[in-house]
Image (tube, coloured by chain):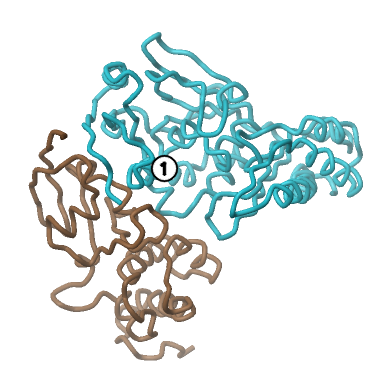
Amino acid sequence: MKSSAFEYAAPRSVAEAVALLRTQDGEAKILAGGQSLMPLLAMRLARPSLLVDLGRIEGLDYVREESGVIAIGAMTTKSTIERSDLVRTRQALFHEATRLIGHPQIRNRGTVGGSMAQADPAAEYPAAALALDAKMRVVGGGGERSIDAADFFVSTLTTALAPDEILIEVRVPMLAPGTGWSMLEVSRRHGDFAMAGTAVTVALDGGRVRSARIVLFGVGPVPVRARAAEQAVAGQKPAAAAWASAATQARDVVEEPLSDHHASAAYRRHLAGVLVERALAEAVTRAGGTA
Amino acid sequence: MSTSRRIRVTVNGEVHEALVDPRLTLADFLRADLGLGGTHVGCEHGVCGACTILLDGRTVRACLMLAVQADERNLTTIEGLGRDGELHPIQQAFVEEHGLQCGFCTPGFVMSVHELLELHPDPSDEEIRDFLGGNLCRCTGYQAIYRSVKLAARMLREPKAPAGVQAEQT
């Protein structure tokens, strides 16, 4: 289990990295934390001609507040994000998503940019990004652009990034005060990828749900919003019956769930419903309402 | 074929210079090029934790890093934990509590426990389970590892107590 041969470059700037990608006609791969890419290389599922290591580029490792948004440099490790007081206090859902990822050793190297660009269907960060309307700042041969999370995750392991584009920053809006949230997942072992998961935010108004955002992950090629479930709880008084109804709607969103040796499609669908029910109750409790 | 790269790495306080193939993993570099066989290769795809080392004091999986990425960095392997032939308290605790049988996973566990106890000097079972979930053992069934971690925590908190003395005095 050794990688095939590749050339290696460690550019010192994003511009240099983009230029390198453009020389390889799509055959280069970006190396960030390596926690997803290295296993692919070891198993020869990826055989890039060139590895472009972003690890020597200064200025891509930061967590800072910018006008109500948390701007996170793409090369920031998950451990750094986990330890960030700003994220823990102002974006508790993103903090929880971070805590759920893998194991400490993975988080010490894995980066937020790498997770988003990898777009694993069962990953926590893409789901959190969709639930929170995060934006991706991207640089490529055509210049810089911003891509909404809703447009960023296209299919299994596929994003809207062009072959010469590099994700440089993830911008996550802070949770509005009083917003309830929950992130739950079921995996076979602690730290495994989720068989099914959900990321939920809830805003209450006068004792009723004003709006809810319900995202499912691990059940299809990309994280998906359960819009029917969101509409089902809007305007409702928090109650177990409301959550059960939302859960039914959420299960129907799971059109073609993945079925593999970890979990069958039927089981994933079942889990999706259970988790949405629990997550809504938990989110409402956090918002200060009674579940 | 690919262009070899020159790297300069500090491992357990010693500086090493080498010319390496870019695809050489850090685990293979430590074992084959530096002769530090204590870092074990169990799965080569980042799930078993047997290759755990410290990079600038933080645990990482050496099989998921390239040697070229360690250029100008500071590494600590299991060989760097003991001092003057003496076992590190964590190693001593594993001996006392039989936290190992075949020993294959042990270096990885010891390195992870090192970071765990730095961050959580008196860890609960839940904190231990959460932190060590990335290290797999096929022999012990983990209960002896829990006991080893708790003994190590006590030993590190009471550095003057000789190893093996029951610390249940209060």
Q: Nearer the viewer, residue A109 or A194?
A: A194
Tint applied to chain B in the drawing: brown
Chain A: its colour in the image is cyan
Q: Going by the image, does A52 lie left or right of A240? A: left
Label 1: chain letter: A
Q: At 40% across and 53% down in the image, what residue appears?
A: A105
Determine which residue is flagged by label 1.
A36
Which of the two residues, B157 or A60, is positioned nearer the viewer here? A60
The residue depicted at 30 percent of the width and 68 percent of the height is B107
Does the image show residue A139? Answer: yes
| In-front residue for pair A91/A76 | A76
Q: Quadrant of residue A67?
A: top right
SS at mark 1 in the image: loop
Whether residue A283 sits left or right of residue A155 in the image: it is right
Residue at image location 68% in from the left, 31% down from the top: A176
**Residue B84, quarter of picture:** bottom left
Instruction: Give amino acid for label 1.
Output: Ser
| Residue A178 appears in the rendering | no
